């Protein structure tokens, strides 16, 4: 299982536009092969900073999505709204 977290800082006046993009694409992302979960989180102290948290069966599934037409469309529209460079992490669950 791969956990993917992407932190994005938006131009404050563009956050509603981003939320609309997310609303329109979240079910399509969730339906992508290998995707088990997608949610959107908002920073408590910086309301124009959001993170996506998603769970993938494998890195191969995540990469398949990242090379898809769906990702290309969503990411192009989203990155046009950024106020700062996004940060992304891929991690795997570890049992202790």
Image (cartoon, grey):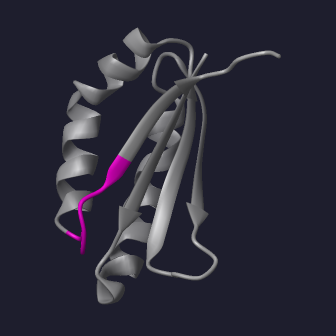
Where 65 falls versus 79 (above or below)? Answer: above
Q: Residue at x 28, y 81 (%)?
A: 11
Q: Nearer the viewer, residue 18 or 3?
A: 3
Residue bounds of the magenta highlight: 81-87
Q: Is 76 inside the magenta-drawn segment?
A: no
Quadrant in the rendering for residue 72:
top left
Residue 37 percent location from the top left of the image: 62, 34
Q: Is residue 85 magenta?
A: yes
Give the position of the N terminus as an image quadrant: top right
Q: Residue at x 31, y 89 (%)?
A: 13
Q: Furthest residue to the front?
A: 96
Residue 80 is left or right of residue 48, and the answer is left
Residue 75 rendering spot, x and y as whole percentages: 24, 49
Quadrant of the rendered image containing residue 3: top right
Q: Main secondary structure of the magenta part?
A: loop
Figure check: 26 above or below 65: below
**Apparent side of residue 84 relative to residue 96 in the rendered image (left or right):** left
Q: How many marks?
A: 0
Image quarter of the C terminus: top right
Image coordinates of residue 76 in percent, x first then y, are 17, 52
Q: Does residue 88 appear to the left or right of 70 in the view shown?
A: right
At 38% across and 61% down in the image, what residue appears?
8
Nearer-the-camera pick, 7 or 94: 94
């Amino acid at each position: 299982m791969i956990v993917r977290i992407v932190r994005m800082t938006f131009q404050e006046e563009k956050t509603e536009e981003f939320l609309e993009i997310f609303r329109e694409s979240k079910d399509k992302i969730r339906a992508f092969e290998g995707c088990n979960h997608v949610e959107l989180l908002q920073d408590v102290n910086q309301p124009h900073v959001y993170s996506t948290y998603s769970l993938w069966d494998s890195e191969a599934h995540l990469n398949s999505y990242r090379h898809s037409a769906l990702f290309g469309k969503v990411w192009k529209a989203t990155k046009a709204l950024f106020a700062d460079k996004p940060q992304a992490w891929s991690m795997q669950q570890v049992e202790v």
